Image (cartoon, rainbow, N blue to C red):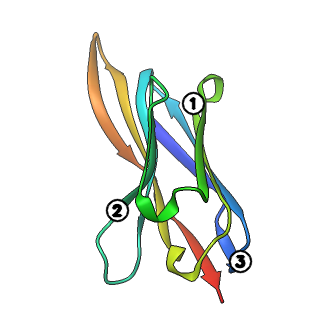
Amino acid sequence: QVQLVETGGGLVQAGGSLRLSCAASGRIASINAMGWYRQAPGKQRELVARIDSASSIDYTDSVKGRFTISRDNAKNTVYLQMNSLKPEDTAVYYCNVDISAWSTLVIRREDYWGQGIQVTVSS
């Protein structure tokens, strides 16, 4: 099995900072990409930031210049440093991991989601 452990989140005032982390463990052959998505009430889930095995990074336009995604390969962990937070950043943030995982003698491409952590930014 593959498990994701998400930490961080909380309540901050506008302009503040938070750091999210997501650690993957289990039957991992390799991690192809790790990223963060978020979902605000009444809205669909959207990509926030994503980093792949070649360190190519995607950000949604609304967080560019404020958020930084990074990866620690030794720990199978992805981080999201969130600075200059705005009330519109308030959402549940979900870690997503694109993994090549062992299944008996076969390596399978699989997608895993964290349970989600609340980020609330007050004005």
Residue underneath mark 1: 76
Disc marking residue 3: none
Q: Quadrant of residue 20?
A: bottom right
Tell me if residue 38 can be seen: yes
Q: Is residue 65 above or below residue 25?
A: below
**Residue drawn where x is 32% and y is 40% of the image:** 111
Judge the density around disc 1: few (<14), some (14-19), many (≥20) Cα neighbours within 10 Å.
some
Disc on the earlier residue, 3 or 2: 3
The amino acid type, in three-letter code, at marker 2 is: Glu
Disc on the earlier residue, 2 or 1: 2
Residue underneath mark 3: 12
Q: Is residue 63 above or below residue 109?
A: below
Q: Foreground: 83 or 41? A: 83
Q: Of tags 2 and 1, which is closer to the observer?
A: 2
**Residue drawn where x is 59% and y is 77% of the image:** 86
How far is the residue under mark 3 from the one under mark 2?
21 Å
Which secondary structure lies at badge 3? strand
The amino acid type, in three-letter code, at marker 3 is: Val
Where residue 60 sits: x, y (%)?
Answer: 41, 57
- Which quadrant holds the C terminus? bottom right
